[in-house]
Image (cartoon, rainbow, N blue to C red):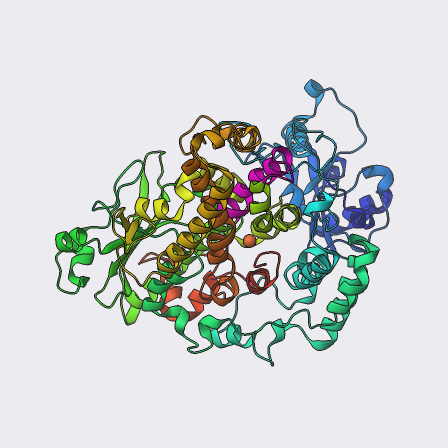
Amino acid sequence: MEHDRSGSSMQEPRRAVQSKLKDHHTNHSIKQNIIKGEIVIQNHGQSGPGKSASLQLYSSTAVDPSTGKGKMSEKAPASSMERASDMMASWVYPFQKTKSGRLFFSNNSYLPNHTPRALVQLRQLELASLRGDGTQEHARPVLGGSELHPYPCRLRTGHPPSNTEPSAESRTETINLDIYVPPDERFSPKKLSEFISNSIQATVHFIIPEAKSLFKQDSSSFESFDEIHDMFSSKGGQAVEGKVREKLKGKVREKLKKLVPNVLFKEINYAGKEDLLKFPLPQIVTENELAWGNDEEFGRQMVAGTNPARIKCLQEFPPQGRNRASTIHASHIEHNLDGLTLVQAMNEWRIFILDHHDYLMPYLSKINTKGVCAYASRTLFFLRADATMKPLAIELSLPGSSEDTEISRVFLPAKKGTEAALWQLAKAHVAANDSAYHQLISHWLHTHAVVEPFIIATRRQLSVMHPVNWLLRPHFKDTMHINALARSILVNSGGILEKTLFTGEISMELSSELYKEWRFDEQALPADLVKRGLALEDPDNPNSPSGVQLLFDDYPYGADGLDIWHAIKTWVTDYCSLFYEDDYSVNSDVEVQAWWSEIQNAGHGDKRNEAGWYKMTTLLDLIEALTTLIWIASGLHASVNFGQYAYAGYPLNRPMLCRKFIPREGTKEFAEFLRDPDKYYLSMLPGRFQMSLCYSINRGSLNAHI
Ligand SMILES: [Fe+2]
């Protein structure tokens, strides 16, 4: 528990407190014997001299029958009282830590069974409060090394074991930009200085916590869509005045001096002369300011946006879940299939689904606290004749009152009126689901995290003379260092992703849950496309050199990706053929065998007994494994990395969390929504500070990097 030293200003001499309370209670006609009671201190807002602390007194003799505790006095202001540390002998904790007022007992001592009756319950409550129940902060589980929380291995840092979990390394600092990485894996000094400089925009709020207070009304909502748009224009400048901006830059430089090696500071300082808080307009709205609200654009981004590898062709209607089927009925969508029946559309593989349902449902009760309001979503699309994706329906689900029930609502597209406004709210909730999945799974887990064990094994098991080491080296460049930095500030407990994504504190636990579904062989692009129903196997067609045929061509991730895949595979095949004559030469390569064994049994040891691993007994195994690995580190990573600012940089297009549920008819919230749907929409989105983080992290090189 942290001590709030500024709270010491509330420690006043006992005599003065008693005198003050006596006067106060006399004025309010309260009996004198109440002075024999116990004092509760409540501190409203920031603590400090003269701040709004108040005292109340519980009687130790008169029991309030309605509460079972001693009768309570009215509040007395504490601002004018003198010090009372001799009586209280304790710090006053910040309210946000305890969620309750602080209770001070007088100097009388009692064994538990001699406690005055009016104080029995208070004694127990205060003990429980001081002890804590360990639930106020969600303890993050150790990831990796267990069936419950499997995870890819990472580089050791050399930190000593954690006190609370000896099998895990401790963390020495919350933010450490000079984190240990083996010298060969480090960024060049120039790259590191550029990286840190570019990341300042994204990380300024974390490096300099006091920066938060420099923003106006940081948790309040934007008043209009124009106001959000103006943040990116020359007049907006992230709602930070010029003088404040200069002050902030000074603080950033001062703090960075302590965080980074001296040798880098000069260059960082130089780069830091750029405006820290000014951002260009994201491409999504450069042509059309309202593109973010457009249904066609919403559909397009599912195949050509920043997270293009989640959408699937729907194989069965209604969509099936782990425990139950979706509540989307044929009647919701069949009028919207451009003249096709549902059966026809399904037979032509033209119904698609963006499914964020099953994996989220078990976590929603934990997620929907601290002002976050999230659903598990399923969104259906129809592939039109012109190859555009038309949204058909959105189903949003919440856990029901018992474990095996769900409460689901279905929203349908509409062009005007209340239905259209509700549809926009539903799309924002889907975008929040998809944004978190993109950041945590598509980007972090499926590229950065899963590749790290391959890099470690390559360095440990393949000589620098080994041709596979030579082949892979450029594709691994800088990955270890950026992963280490990401663990320091991006995916760490209390880090950027926890602060910005709706998944909050369970973000990494969720990525561990989805790692259970991961298979290395399914990251091969052709296998991935076939599994998601976006391509069919077509091994003998000379026009499909990658061995698969896309269902529709207007899918850049698939169409361009297969070209890149084919180029990588051709290169890997030619290269390997220079060194390996046949399967035996792969089988008898002791270094490659040790390399593969370490990847499977140690690096991805939690998945060692699962399917998805090539046997590495043939040349084809080696070629497939290397092609997949290079694809992950190049094409796949590029697809989820480089579009981030263009799409997610505009918070209206990809909100990362919502602060309100969609109101139900007949409720007070629904009336509020009807009065001004746009205002309701804006109040549902993250507050100003959080929204500014959304676009700054997508701009900063920590998240969107090279
Ligand atoms: Fe990345």
Q: Nearer the viewer, residue 230 or 537?
A: 537
Image quadrant for the C terminus? bottom right
Q: Nearer the viewer, residue 374 or 391?
A: 391
Residue at 28% across, 56% down: 543
Residue 450: within the magenta? yes
Image quadrant for the N terminus? top right
Residue at 24% across, 59% down: 382
- Rendering quarter of residue 203: bottom right
Find residue 130 and report its horizontal and vertical position in percent. Answer: 69, 33
Q: Nearer the viewer, residue 255 or 301?
A: 301
Find residue 699 and report its horizontal and vertical position in percent. Answer: 58, 64
- Rendering quarter of residue 681: bottom left
Up the image or down, 115 lies above or below 75; here it is above
Q: Nearer the viewer, residue 40 or 397?
A: 397
User: Is residue 83 found left or right of 26 in the rendered image?
Assistant: right
Up the image or down, 244 lies above or below 77; here it is below
Stretch of the chain drawn in magenta: 444-466
